[in-house]
Image (cartoon, rainbow, N blue to C red):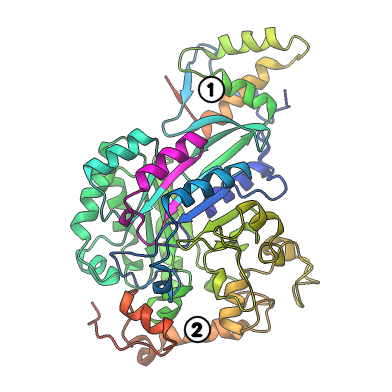
Amino acid sequence: MTQNSLGESAVQKAVQAQAKNNGVAANITQTQPLWLLAEVTYRCPLHCAFCYNPTDYDKHTQNELSTEQWIQALRDARKLGAIQLGISGGEPLLRDDIEDIVIEARKLGYYSNLITSGVGLTEKRIQAFKDGGLDHIQLSMHDITEEINNFITNTKTFELKKKVAAMIKAHGYPMVLNVVIHRYNIGHMKEILEMAEALGADYIELANTQYYGWSLVNRSQLMPLKEQVEEAERITNEYRAKVNGKMKIFFVVPDYFGDRPKKCMNGWGEVFMIVTANGDVLPCHSARVLPNMQFPNVRENGLEYAWKESPAFNKYRGDSWMKGPCVTCPEKHNDLAGCRCQAFLLSGDAESADPVCSLSPNHHLIEKAIEDSKNPVIASQPIIFRTDKNSKKYVAGDQERVEQFHALP
Amino acid sequence: MDKLAIDPTLSTIQLSDVFALALHHRFQWEEAQQSYVILFPEGMVKLHGGAGEVIKRVDGKASVGDIVSELKAAFPDATTIETDVIGMFDMAYGKAWLRKV
């Protein structure tokens, strides 16, 4: 699962449409959870080193919501205005009730999207999704080489992904690909775009790794050089001009190399709502890392309470919680001080400016991370893959890098 | 109907053109938004009343000219319907929400 893949582009588009007001009013009305992300399970057959899922996900694999609880959540969110539904994980296809969830989503009027690695997608299941009214399927791809695909996911899934891509196309679905970009595939940008075009992709998202969960643990191993990112963007722009709209290409810029932080989730509790496998309701993917926060859970309170009244969703709405330098910054409404999780994970203070900002007193932490990624001693430490075994160690409180030996490709 | 920024004399839209919603796009009324929307993979646009009235009539059969006539009949007080409708088609086709039939 990639964090970038989960609909930020939806909001970007709505906001763009708002700016160019040619008969289209896309003004986002006062906070509605337009995008609902259902992280239906944290179980996953892949072990991607860049996964944003929590490192302690293993504690949420035994207490997943039931089909009925998911259907209730879909109904409640729809009443609050949710319209785009992402069914994600982990690997959602590890649940056998995705067909039921899809049927209900269509009935309720959602535009629904299955976000999958492709593992577990069969002819029978894709036909059931089509019949049930699933609108599209977003497939993760990793590289043009079998070697890197299998290395970064720690599985042998290269051939399978190509088969699944063909199956998606054959069933008349738009081909939506997501490729997480990191040190091991950033040099293959042109070849990746060529592969996407050859597969008949309608949309491809090139999502530079953002550092949360497992990808934060592996940050020094995954981060490319700034020059590589610039080159990748140049190649992407060239390719975009060449295909001339036939394939829509989104390049998600990595915030570590920018001067200003991203407007994370388009604002806390503004347009996104995430319901996790165990029923926690979150304003962003990794919010549970924040200290002294109690997130609502659908088993206890409904989604209306979660969205409108819960202290957690209200905590970082608006700008009254901000500190200096953000609180007096003329640009504060552009980015709302960036990402709360990143601020906390890097500086220990969730209310401080996102260290990505060059005006942040903690900006040196980003510079240090970039330096570390160039340090051959640090960068050659083994990658810690997203496995149940490693997650159990995090649950048990073992924060040390877990011993695992994988030869670098 | 809203004023459109597009100059109709530069438009490539002909009154005889017939459009349908692009593949994988869905047009629906959104109660929570009190407006029509177009939905597509990972995105949504919310349409003003006027734009909604145009797209609502796009069915793969009616020509642009048919839609102009229909809207003129429905909104007799509006004076710039043809310009507005063509501008709307220009934009919607340009953004690939519509395909030519």
Q: Position of residue A53 (x, y in %)?
A: 44, 68
Is residue A179 rendered to the left or right of residue A199? right
Identify which residue, A55 or A378, lies in the foreground: A55
Q: Quadrant of residue A330?
A: bottom right
Identity of the residue drawn at 53% across and 69% down: A286
Amino acid type at circle 1 is Thr
State which quarter of the image contains the N terminus of chain A.
Answer: bottom left
State which quarter of the image contains the C terminus of chain A.
Answer: bottom left
Residue A6 visible in the current orientation = no
**Residue A369, numbered circle:** 2
Amino acid type at circle 2 is Ala
Chain bearing tag 2 is A
**Where is A60 relative to A365, above or below?**
above
Nearer to us of marks 1 and 2 is: 2
| Secondary element at tag 1 | loop
Q: Position of residue B97 (x, y in %)?
A: 50, 32
Q: How crowded is the residue under tag 2: few (<14 C-alpha within 10 Å), some, or many (20+)? A: some
Is residue A186 rendered to the left or right of residue B82? left
**Where is A64 relative to B50, above or below?**
below
Identity of the residue drawn at 68% across and 69% down: A337
| Secondary element at tag 2 | helix
Identify which residue, A51 or B65, lies in the foreground: A51
Identify which residue, A323 or A358, lies in the foreground: A323
Identity of the residue drawn at 38% across and 67% down: A62
Magenta residues, start to end: A87-113
Residue A142 visible in the current orientation = yes
**Residue B86, numbered circle:** none
**Where is A224 relative to B9, above or below?**
below
Q: Position of residue A379 (x, y in %)?
A: 37, 86
Q: Which residue is mark 1?
A: B12
